[in-house]
Image: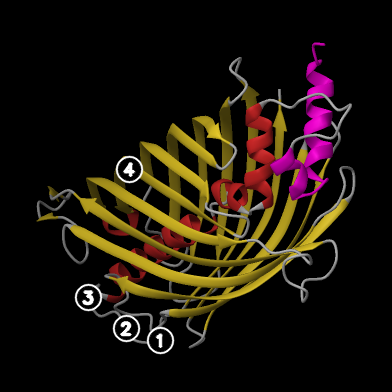
Amino acid sequence: MKISKTRHLGVLACCLGAGAALAQDGPPPGMPQLPPGVMAQINLGKAGLLGSFYSNEQWGTTQGRIGQSRFTIGTATAPFASTTGYKDGSTDLVLPLSALKALPDGKSYLRFGVMYVKPNGANNQVEVDGNNPSVSVQYMTFPNPNTMLSFGVFAEHTDVRDVVSGAMAPRDGYGIRADLLHKFNDSWGISVRGEYSWGETDLQIPAIGYQHVQGDDRFYTQVELIGSYDSSSFSAVPQGWSLHPTFGINFQRNFLEATADSFGAVSSGLVGDTEDYGMVWASLGLEQMVAPGQWGFNASLGVEHEYVNDLDAFVDESTYIVGSVGASMRTRSGQQVVVGYTRHQGVNGNRWNQTLLASLNFSF
């Protein structure tokens, strides 16, 4: 019997709230057999791996710190400028929209994404505000219930300025992204992400008539090892909840073109023609498993440490405590709403960032 699109989405939503056993053993007698792509998403979602794929938390944190640090170094190295007392702080609004289109083979999808990020800098010596829209298209395929492969393209625009000095540095870019999700066993899986972005930054300081246009490319990669335990596998986990221990690492290298500025001086980046940034993190999260139409809550606490940061010259901060709280609700027709709050707090008190997230995911 052919299943209608509406019914298909309703079955998916119901199964997402029905437990890991369904993903492993298939639907009970009398329920239509689900497509392999749906079964795989249930399985990888329960393992916490799809959450890692959809999240841009660590990627966004990395871009924010690099951008803020560039403005700080530029300010601190200007003639007669102070070289002490610099701190970073930002409150960011993140609004992602994601849509999935199932393909005829039953195991593949097209994902269309639109994201808007609005950073709002704290009142410091350097106060960076901005607007960062981006769009993406990805092909996702699930060759088996434990694996996802994804390839895609994206375009992005970054428009940031230092409110204090009036300096601005818009960047336009486009790139490619690839992802791998794989569940090793009932308790652990891995999420891998890699991307390359070709871009151009236009640094402007209107007060002195300065402009510097240069190529600004980046390579970014991230790996997360994610665990998943419920009360049946670990008695300390509350009934109806899932525990997710996570260990991650990322690395980014920016490649900056050496060009002449409006004063005729040739230079690349503030610390050379490449900039490296990387951090490691560990966290422990709890996620409530609920039926479609109900709100489920989540929270996590962790630590992250920068193992390399070529731009850390004036802000003494490399280790952070990270906490988050959130809630999500999936309807029976397949739409999902996610809201959350995350705080990254430097242990030295010199840098912090907080993020307000509101996202909508749906199928068509």
- Disc marking residue 82: 2
Which mark sits nearer the N-terminus, 2 or 4?
A: 2
Which of disc 4 and disc 3 is earlier in sequence? 3
Task: Give whichever of discs 4 and 1 has the lower sequence position.
Answer: 1
Placement of 103 over or under 161, stated as above or below = above
Tag 3's secondary structure?
loop
Front residue (pair 285, 87): 285
Q: Amino acid at mark 3?
A: Pro
Q: Residue 180 in the image: state x and y as whole percent.
A: 46, 43
**Quarter of the image where one finds residue 339:** bottom right
Please tell me the numbered disc located at residue 344: none
Circle nearer the viewer, 2 or 4: 4
* SS type, badge 2: loop
Residue 5 vs 100, above or below: the answer is above
As measured in the structure, the alpha-carbon distance from the residue carrying label 3 to the one carrying label 1 is 17 Å
Q: Is residue 195 magenta?
A: no
Q: Which residues are magenta?
A: 1-25
Mark 3 highlights which residue?
A: 79
Residues marked 2 and 1 touching at CB (< 8 Å): yes
